[in-house]
Amino acid sequence: MKNPVRIAPSLLAADFTRLGAEVAAIEKAGADWLHLDIMDGHFVPNISFGPGLIKALRPLSAMPFDVHLMIAPADPYLAAFAEAGADWISLHPEAGPHLHRSLQTIRALGKKAGVVLNPATPIAHVAEVIDLLDLVLVMSVNPGFGGQSFIRSQLQKIAALKALIGDRDIRLEVDGGVTTETAPLCVEAGADVLVAGTAVFAKPDYATAIAGLRGC
Ligand SMILES: O=C(CO)[C@H](O)[C@H](O)COP(=O)(O)O
Ligand SMILES: [Fe+2]
């Protein structure tokens, strides 16, 4: 059976002076997951926020918290993000020497485990660890910033991953430059979770923005 498309607004594009209210607003507007971008100023050229913010927001929402780690090393911080309230924890293969062990750690913490592929990262990593995956996240921009343009070549990667995943219970998520124009292309290629920062938080009506991305 085809998975329903889930919309995961990225908090990176929210109004940082009122994050609690922003989370409540997107949940009321129909968001399925909350996407949280963790940047360390080292793995990516930007710094965002850490487990303290996740812990503060956790009691305010029932949405699954989808934590995208753009930090290296990631292993020393996996327990902190799990304890703070992450439900899904995803990391890049380039963030450490032992991707398989990192995914085992996330699973052992009782969380859903994901791998993130940069535009230049091949899908071969996924095949090697597929039995440990709950999620594959395709970056359709180079990570580090919101508001960038969608890299169309990643549509072929999404389609190849869809074929690789087959009927396994693994979500296929796309992150970066997702708009009402690019969202249908991602879904057509096989994506079932769409991250959207600017395409939700820069719009005046979050419910309309989320419904538009979902294609209804
Ligand atoms: O991981 C990310 C950047 O590294 C963000 O999730 C992504 O950029 C979302 O922002 P937008 O939808 O505005 O492109
Ligand atoms: Fe992200």
Image: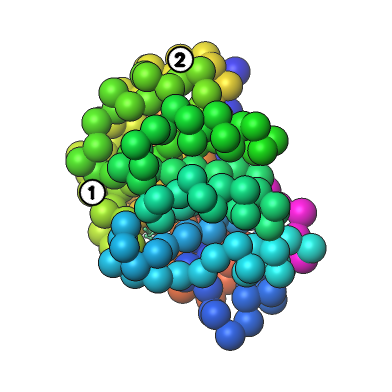
Q: Which residue is rendered at x = 53% and y = 73% of the image?
A: 14
Q: Position of residue 9 (x, y in %)?
A: 54, 58
* Nearer to me, 58 or 176: 58
Q: Which residues are the magenta region?
A: 60-66
Q: Secondary structure at mark 1?
A: loop
Relative vertical location of residue 104 with respect to residue 41 in this rendering, above or below: above
Which comes before the other along the chain, label 1 or label 2? 1
Residue 27 can be seen in this image: no
Q: Which residue is rendered at x = 69% and y = 76% of the image?
A: 21
Location of the N terminus by quadrant is top right
Relative vertical location of residue 195 with respect to residue 198 in this rendering, above or below: above
- Where does label 1 land, which residue? 151
Q: Position of residue 206 (x, y in %)?
A: 58, 67
Q: The disc labelled 2 sits on which kind of residue?
A: Gly
Q: Secondary structure at mark 2?
A: loop
Left or right of 23? Residue 137 is: left
Relative vertical location of residue 149 with respect to residue 182 in this rendering, above or below: below
